[in-house]
Amino acid sequence: MSLQVGCLSFRQPYAGLVLNGLKTIETRWRPLLSEFENCTLAVHIAQKDWEGSEWREVLTCRQGMTCTQIDDLLDSGERFGRGVVAGLVEVGETWVYPDSLPREEMLALEAAALLTGLEEKHLTRLSFPRWLKEPMYARGHKDIWTIDIPLALLPALPPAPHRTVCA
């Protein structure tokens, strides 16, 4: 038996940061996740790294993390390697970044996204991240694709509130 869910590929370190609960807002140039609101989404760890380093600046300057804490976090995010479906997350509301925001709200959104320069992007809330018991090897795809995750790989956690499985 398996659980059929939508799956999205994330580059590192963002895949690990999502599954470790630090990245709670996903950003895209289009509303890719809007149709998955209130659904469970599988997180695939891509082979490539994210090219920017804004995430490191946000973690050190805004969240006060030390280099050692960041290194430990990065190691945790690599526990299953690359090219695998590694976990699940719940998808929340998607909205377009507002044209004008008070500085405090802008900084809070950037901290949750672990990214700066959110103007004109579509933001989506992510919650209830959890790692699978073991990685599931899979080739990544562009956009969202459907994947069947064996029930034996699902973590033994209480169900997320308001969760719908969408594929």
Image (cartoon, rainbow, N blue to C red):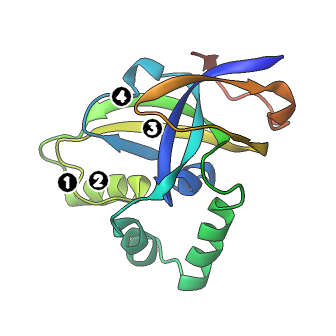
Assign a secondary structure to mark 4: loop
The reply to whether the C-beta atoms of the residues labelled 4 and 1 are less than 8 Å apart is no
Q: Are marks 4 and 3 in contact (CB under 8 Å)?
A: no
3D distance between C-alphas at marks 4 and 2: 23 Å
Residue 1 lies, in percent from the top left, at 84, 16
Does dot 3 land on a helix, a strand or a loop?
strand
Give the CA distance from mark 1 to mark 3: 20 Å
Distance, label 4 to label 1, CA atoms, is 26 Å
- What's the mark number on residue 32? 4
Q: In the rendered image, which residue does mark 3 sit on?
A: 125
Q: CA distance from mark 1 to mark 2?
A: 5 Å
Quadrant assignment for the C terminus? top right
Question: Marks 3 and 2: CB-CB under 8 Å?
Answer: no
Sequence-first tag of 4 and 2: 4
Q: CA distance from mark 4 to mark 3?
A: 12 Å
The residue tagged 1 is: 102
In this view, the mark in front (1 or 3): 3
Q: Tell me the amino acid under the disc marked 4.
A: Leu
- Dot 2 amino acid type: Glu
Q: Earlier in the sequence, mark 3 or mark 2?
A: 2
Q: Classify mark 1: residues with Cα within 10 Å, few (<14), some (14-19) or many (20+).
A: few
